[in-house]
């Protein structure tokens, strides 16, 4: 298994923290959806999904 470089370590830790926050926010969106009995607008979902797919693409390229 490869070790993280000195430059990669802090940015990866930052990304992991942001992902933890993102997970908490997405759960809050789900809770609000149930409480409001109103779904998340499709265009908002698509925008966020596309961003997540781009993040996945970038990280995948980083493994090569």
Image (spheres, grey):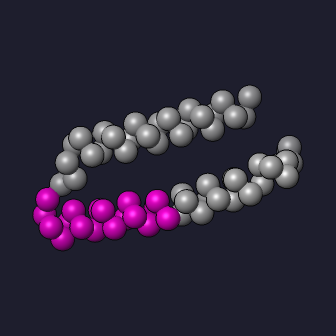
Q: Position of residue 34 (x, y in %)?
A: 20, 66
What is the span of residues highlighted in magenta in the rendered image? 21-38
Whether residue 41 sits left or right of residue 64 in the image: it is: left
Quadrant, the N terminus: top right
Task: Name the dominant secondary structure of the magenta segment.
Answer: helix
Q: Which residue occupies 54% across, 57% down?
A: 19
Residue found at the very far bottom of the displayed protein? 35
Counting every numbered tag in the picture gives 0
Residue found at the very far front of the displayed protein? 7
Q: Position of residue 11 (x, y in %)?
A: 70, 53
The quarter of the picture where residue 20 lies is bottom right
Q: Position of residue 55 (x, y in %)?
A: 53, 40
Whether residue 62 sits left or right of residue 17 in the image: it is: right
Q: Which residue occupies 19% across, 48% down?
A: 41
Quadrant, the C terminus: top right
Q: Which residue occupies 69% across, 53% down?
A: 12
Taking the magenta stretch, the answer to whether it contains residue 29 is yes
The quarter of the picture where residue 16 lies is bottom right
| 61 shown above or below 23 | above
Q: Which residue occupies 77% across, 54% down?
A: 9
Whether residue 18 sits left or right of residue 2 in the image: it is: left
Q: Position of residue 8 (x, y in %)?
A: 77, 49
Taking the magenta stretch, the answer to whether it contains residue 14 is no
Whether residue 58 sits left or right of residue 7 in the image: it is: left
| 10 shown above or below 5 | below
């Amino acid at each position: 298994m490869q070790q993280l470089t000195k430059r990669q370590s802090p940015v990866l830790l930052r990304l992991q923290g942001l992902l933890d926050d993102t997970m908490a926010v997405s759960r809050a969106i789900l809770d609000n959806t149930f409480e409001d009995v109103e779904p998340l607008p499709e265009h908002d979902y698509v925008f966020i999904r596309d961003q997540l797919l781009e993040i996945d693409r970038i990280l995948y390229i980083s493994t090569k």
